[in-house]
Each structure stands twice: as C-alpha cells, then as structure tokens.
Amino acid sequence: NIVGNSPAIQPVFARMEKILVTDSTVLILGESGTGKELVARAIHFNGLRKDKPLIAINCGAIPAELLESELFGHEKGSFTGATGARKGYFEEADGGTIFLDEVGELPLTTQVRLLRVLENGEFIKVGSSDVQKTNVRIVAATNLNMEEAIQKGKFREDLYYRLSVFPLQWKSLRQRSQDLLPIAERLLTKHCKKQNK
C-alpha cells in the first residue's frame, strides 16, 4: 500500500526488502504524519509473520497509568476498576507483530519492562507474579531525535539499541515530491470508488 517510486525512496525500499526476510526488531524514524504506520504494516504483511496478528499501539495516546495494563494485561482486582482479568497486547499478538508508534513517549518504568520482552520474551501482568512468554516481532516508530532523548535521560540507551536492530529512515513527501502525483491519483481513485463515481 505504499505508493511511490521516486529516487529518494528507492534506497528505503531496498532496505525494506532486507528487513522482510528477517525477524529482527525495526525502528522507523521520521517526521509525524509521513506514513510510518504504512511502513510497519508493509513490513508485517510482507514478512514472515503475515498470517499472524498485527496490533498497532500509539504509546503517546494511552495514559501512563494505563499503559502497562494495556501492553501486558492485568489480573482481577489488581487496581481500582479491574473487575476481571484482561489479556494485554503482547499476549494477544503472540506469534505476530506489535507496532509501537511514538515509542519515544514511553515512561521509563515501561521502557524497563519492554526491554525484558525484547531480551527474553518475558512479561508479567499487572497484579501477578507469574512470568509469561510471548513471541512477537516489535516494529517501533518515533519522530524524536533518539540520541537527544537518551542524553536528556528520557529514553534508555540499552532499549534504543535493542529496538534499532534495523533502523529505517522514512522520507517525508517534500523529500520525494515526484511521488505526489501517484499518491493523489491513488487517493482520488479510492474516493471515487467509495462515492460510486
């Protein structure tokens, strides 16, 4: 679903081809609104886990106090309002891919737990003491300057290196203006089909 064939994007596609035949963690870097989720979906649906679930999470959109419950699940009674046990995204996506959009927004405490998942595939639900296993590919994305975030103590350096096994710098449209016309044509065709015109 990625439209474009400009010279600026060809090296990115070549790198993506290498990514597709691995199961490594990917970190997509690029400005907001440039379609990093499209890249993550392309990696999943053309990769080794295409027949398994893909779960996309915007880390910046979930309140910090709920984030660990969303990612790792919780047990009944583990906090006010936890009226039943709940699976987290890492359990739901077992065998598939988790896309962590805006990964740079993760609180430091959650970064520690994510590092454990990356290191040995283990996590613990909120309110539990039982270690669970998961087998997921993590594709993360951020618009932050990660080196700057590390220097300011906002992001763990060890987690950054675990996430960026395959870093992928995604281009904005102003860097690939030749792709504007094919993208406009695709959007127009899609709109016309919806409107039966």
Image (spheres, rainbow, N blue to C red):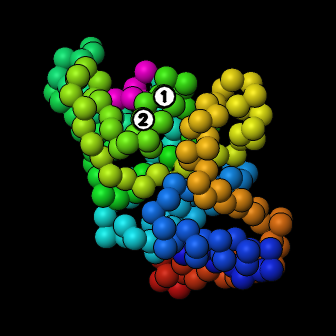
Q: Which circle marks residue 64 in the picture?
A: none
Q: In the rendered view, does 185 fall on the left or right side of 123? A: right
Q: Residues within 10 Å of mark 1 (few under 14, many from 20)?
A: some
Q: Farthest residue toward the bottom? A: 197
Q: Residue at x 74, y 24 (%)?
A: 152
**Residue 83 in which image quadrant:** top left
State whether residue 62 is above or below residue 174: above
What range of the chain is rendered magenta? 65-69
Residue 89 x, y percent position in the rendering: 34, 43
State the image quarter where residue 70 is shown: top left
The reply to whether the C-beta atoms of the residues labelled 1 and 2 are less than 8 Å apart is yes
Q: Is residue 23 left or right of residue 144?
A: left
| Nearer to me, 111 or 131 | 131
Vertical arrangement, residue 116 with respect to residue 91, above or below: above
Magenta segment's dominant SS is helix
Residue 131 at x, y percent in the picture: 25, 32
Q: Which residue is mark 1?
A: 112
Whether 66 is among the magenta residues is yes
User: Mark 2 — residue?
Assistant: 116
The kind of residue tagged 2 is Arg
Please provide percent x and percent y for residue 117: 40, 40
- Give the SS element for disc 2: helix
Give the residue displayed 48% in from the left and 67% down from the top.
22
Instruction: Give left or right: position of 21 versus 54.
Output: right
Residue lying at 71% horizontally and 53% vertically, measured from the top left: 30
Residue 125 placement (x, y as % from top left): 28, 29
Can you say whether 51 is above or below 33 in the image? below
Query: Residue at the location (80% across, 80% down)?
Result: 7
Q: Residues within 10 Å of mark 2 (few under 14, many from 20)?
A: some
Q: CA distance from mark 1 to mark 2?
A: 7 Å
Does the rendering let one see residue 180? Answer: no
